[in-house]
Image (cartoon, rainbow, N blue to C red):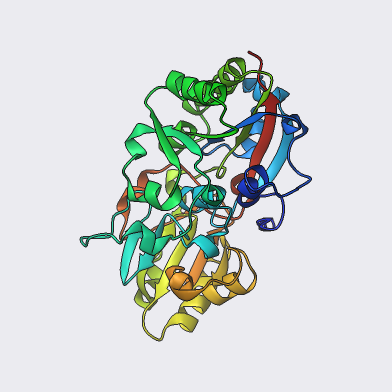
């Protein structure tokens, strides 16, 4: 298997807002968007393209939509991908380079906006760019996200509209289109939630896929034919069995701290040990992961253009990008071990996401 390279200059989630809001002409948008007076972009967290292909019989509505796969960003994780989607920038440009990343010798949990025992940094210090190219776009997302640090960093300048039930997500989007909004952004997190908790190989996941399909169908029924519904995601998922976690004991003496994701693990080297850590990581984990040094990852453009200022130092000195269905243990973050399905790496299951569209049917 070869790693999937993000299409930062082409068909990727980082190019959506420049095309949809900024008017950049691209050839890869679904034809169903042509002539639409309004576009509702709904992000279905955790819905990879390969999951759609494997479960089309459970997705009769999604199966009728126009479009195909595009890439997410690296790492293929929510914190980085949603910020890239909203800002139109690669992770090395906006600076949210993972679920957890080192800042000022502390590890910041980006989604929870927590930094060990210390006060977390001001979101503007971490990510300074406005969302949606500075436009005041309505964002319909979970009410509980309203005052979080991640929301402030990811959606700076947007108009927050909270929902607590799927029916209100749909109705908010319908009303916004009816009021004349040309672009509406909606977010649904629960497929990702179910996959993390239960994995991909059971009725829980299948039932949630069916719920996602009903959501798409209900949204199409609520919108007028002059409006288009555009469906995408931030990443796919990989199922990891409980016995397939790999501990990092062999490189622990060379590692000062850990961050990233289980499938895109950041190792920050002890002073003077970066070269030795990279060599040891390749020897111990090269069978299960693509092993990069920070310099290789940046030089080869996996996370975007060469970063400015301190952003590069937020990435580990060594990065373990899982190739096999495994997770790499972070001994400082045991909560992660409870996850069943995960993401973050460069495999097709994680990197390809849908870009599908249909016209309203109301």
Residue 80 lies, in percent from the top left, at 49, 54
Q: Is residue 306 above or below residue 65?
A: below
* Residue 330 is at least partly visible in this image: no
Q: Is residue 102 above or below residue 37?
A: below
Q: Residue at x 35, y 39 (%)?
A: 145
Residue 308 lies, in percent from the top left, at 51, 73
Q: Residue at x 54, y 74 (%)?
A: 293
Q: Is residue 222 above or below residue 204?
A: above
Q: Quadrant of the N terminus?
A: bottom right
Please give the count of numbered marks on the rendered protein. 0
Q: Nearer the viewer, residue 32 or 202?
A: 32
Query: Residue 213 is drawn in which quadrant?
Result: top right
Residue 92 lies, in percent from the top left, at 53, 65
Query: Residue 123 is drawn in which quadrant?
Result: bottom left
Tell whether 299 sits left or right of 278. Answer: right
Q: Residue furthest left?
A: 117
Q: Quadrant of the C terminus?
A: top right
Residue 164 lies, in percent from the top left, at 37, 25
* Residue 290 is at least partly visible in this image: yes
């Amino acid at each position: 298997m070869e790693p999937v390279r993000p299409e930062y200059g082409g068909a990727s989630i980082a190019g959506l807002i420049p095309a949809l809001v900024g008017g950049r002409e691209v050839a890869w948008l679904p034809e169903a968007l042509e002539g639409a007076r309004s576009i509702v972009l709904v992000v279905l967290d955790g819905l990879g393209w390969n999951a759609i292909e494997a479960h089309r019989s459970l997705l009769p509505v999604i199966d009728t939509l126009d479009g195909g796969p595009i890439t997410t960003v690296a790492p293929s994780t929510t914190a980085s991908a949603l910020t890239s989607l909203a800002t139109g920038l690669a992770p090395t440009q906006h600076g949210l380079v993972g679920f957890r990343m080192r800042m000022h010798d502390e590890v910041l949990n980006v989604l929870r906006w927590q930094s060990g025992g210390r006060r977390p940094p001001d979101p503007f210090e971490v990510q300074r760019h406005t969302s949606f190219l500075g436009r005041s776009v309505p964002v319909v997302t979970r009410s509980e996200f309203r005052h979080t640090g991640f929301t402030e960093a990811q959606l700076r300048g947007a108009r927050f509209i909270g929902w607590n039930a799927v029916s209100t997500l749909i109705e908010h989007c319908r009303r916004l289109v009816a009021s004349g909004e040309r672009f509406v952004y909606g977010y649904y997190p629960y497929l990702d939630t179910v996959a993390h908790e239960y994995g991909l190989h059971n009725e829980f996941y299948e039932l949630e896929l069916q719920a996602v399909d009903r959501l798409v169908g209900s949204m199409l029924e609520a919108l007028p034919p002059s409006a288009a519904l555009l469906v995408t995601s931030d990443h796919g998922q990989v199922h990891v069995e409980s016995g397939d976690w790999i501990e990092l004991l062999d490189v622990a003496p060379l590692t000062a701290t850990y961050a990233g994701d289980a499938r895109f693990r950041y190792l920050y080297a002890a002073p003077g040990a970066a070269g030795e850590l990279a060599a040891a990581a390749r020897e111990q984990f090269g069978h299960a992961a693509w092993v990069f040094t920070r310099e290789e990852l940046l030089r080869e453009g996996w996370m975007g253009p060469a970063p400015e200022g301190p952003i590069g130092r937020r990435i580990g000195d060594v990065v373990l990008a899982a190739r096999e269905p495994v997770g790499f243990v972070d001994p400082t973050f045991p909560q992660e071990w409870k996850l069943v399905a995960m993401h973050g790496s460069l495999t097709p299951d994680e990197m390809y996401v849908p870009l599908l569209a249909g016209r309203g049917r109301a």
